[in-house]
Amino acid sequence: MPTVAVIGGGPAGATAAALLAKRRFTVCVFESSHFPRPHIGESLLPATIEALEFSGAAAKVREAAFTVKNGATMAWGVDHALWTWYFRETNTSQPHAYQVNRDEFDELLLRHAAACGAEICEGAEVRHVIFEDGIAQGIEVNNQFHAFDYVIDASGQSSLIAQQRNTKIWDQDFRNLAIYQYFEGGTHLDGDATGNILVESVEDGWLWKIPLKHNISSVGLVADRERALAAIRLTSVETWFTTVIKSSEHTSKLLLGANAISDCTATRDWSYASSQFTGSRHSLIGDAACFIDPLFSTGVHLAIYSATLCAALVATTFSDSNLEMLARESFERQYRRQYEHFRELARLFYGANRAVDSYFWEARRITGATAYSPRAAFVRAVSGQTALGYERTTLSHGVLPTAFTLALEHLEGDREARRTALGELTTCDFALGKNIEVVETALFAGTVYEHGQVIRRENLDDIPVSPFVADIIALVNIETMSHMRLNAALAAKGWSKEVIQTSLTPTLQLLFVEGVINTT
């Protein structure tokens, strides 16, 4: 079987290694540190647990007795009152996630990868990835070259390949600084919100408080980098952090009686993304590929999501060479869309807050009708809403940009008008909407990518379609067609009378409501 080097044993690397080892690849994980090791980013999303089902690690996570996270509680928006949203409002299959002690969680995933058959090399720092004509050949560890058929960079924020190939692009909209510390004792929120993350906007930025097991809390601050550094120079990191916590209305109360059990740590919290997430015989996943502001607890989710896609890409690379290029394009497109989705949500979150008036929030406020075009406003911020669910609930508590609100109202009004007109479709002629095409591509199918077709629309996520739907779109793209003519044309293409009778009308209804086809 092909050999795969995984650089980094965090959630991204461990998940990719477990998935590939289960598929009988020869996998070696090179981790520079020794586990367990401390790490921040403790708050998971339900989608993270669902993704871990693929690797088989989800059951072990559930058994670890981590704090159950039912949602999030925030002091943010139009006033400073606490409000809470719950995962169960939009996700009945996975109504909660977990707050995880990262030293234990990360080691659990790494040992699971070993149990699946991956070789784990701790204390092994990879210095370089060796390329020849753009194709990854292997890695350099301790001044020795090790050849591998495929290299996965899960090196975290050191971003080994992106730094080596100069493809790491810093995001100028998110130049923040994070300060964090661990506390023992104190209290948590009440009732179903006991395990929730608390996000509280303060004058200097926003605070998080994450309840972990063993009565420990992760507490942190995200602040403007330059202003934070100026304040720290006048005192110290710990003194300024303590001052900000004391200025908070809610976090400070929950920390009454709590004792700090770790040093106060400051770290650069700049967002970034590599201009390329994959190439010939190599891929970047997790923080090695991109990092977004921690506002929506997306770090571990993006790590495990990208690892799942990457494992399918590697499997496809060696099982179907004819599909490799399309699979790489799909991996890049899917992963980048997910990253950009969370980035735009963070922009809207910062821009919509009116609970605190300060430099931090004013500098990040989105104003004016030119911030987003009407179509892009909805697409860039709410695309993926069905899958991720809670973000729109969050945004509804803020003061959103006028263009965004109008675009959302326009789109929902258009959909409602189309639903109302559904009964007239059998007497109409149909034409394809603007800037819409059916594209041959590779579709993620769990363990591999498979040949498939998608509806591609400008600035929107691809919609996978069946051959039947693709034929309908191809027909109305040639000329306007009535329901009766479509029936005959589909029969001429070989579709059975039963399929046409049961599927044509509901398919036309769905395509019409979504704006893929129009009536004439």
Image: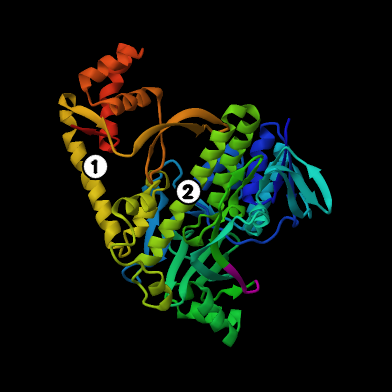
Q: Which residue is mark 1?
A: 415
- Say which of 268 and 428 sits in front: 428
Residue 338 shows which numbered tag? Answer: 2
Q: Residue at x 68, y 55 (%)?
A: 164
Q: Residue 322 is drawn in which quadrant?
A: top right
Q: Is residue 264 magenta?
A: yes
Q: Is residue 412 above or below residue 499?
A: below
Q: Quadrant of the C terminus?
A: top left
Q: Is residue 252 above or below residue 129?
A: below
Q: What sort of colour scheme is used for the picture?
A: rainbow
Q: Is residue 214 magenta?
A: no
Q: Earlier in the sequence, mark 1 or mark 2?
A: 2
Instruction: State how far apart marks 1 and 2 are (Cα).
Output: 24 Å
Q: Are marks 1 and 2 in contact (CB under 8 Å)?
A: no
Question: Given the image, on which type of amino acid does mark 2 rest?
Answer: Gln
The tally of labels here is: 2
Question: Given the image, on which type of amino acid does mark 1 rest?
Answer: Arg
Residue 504 on image: x %, y % = 28, 22
Does dot 2 land on a helix, a strand or a loop?
Answer: helix
Q: Residue 283 is drawn in which quadrant?
A: top right
Residue 474 on image: x %, y % = 34, 26
Does dot 1 land on a helix, a strand or a loop?
Answer: helix
Q: Residue 189 is drawn in which quadrant?
A: bottom left
Magenta segment boundaries in residue numbering: 262-268
- Say which of 195 and 236 sits in front: 236
Does residue 398 appear left or right of residue 59 in this picture?
left
Residue 198 on image: x %, y % = 46, 65
Residue 519 on image: x %, y % = 20, 32
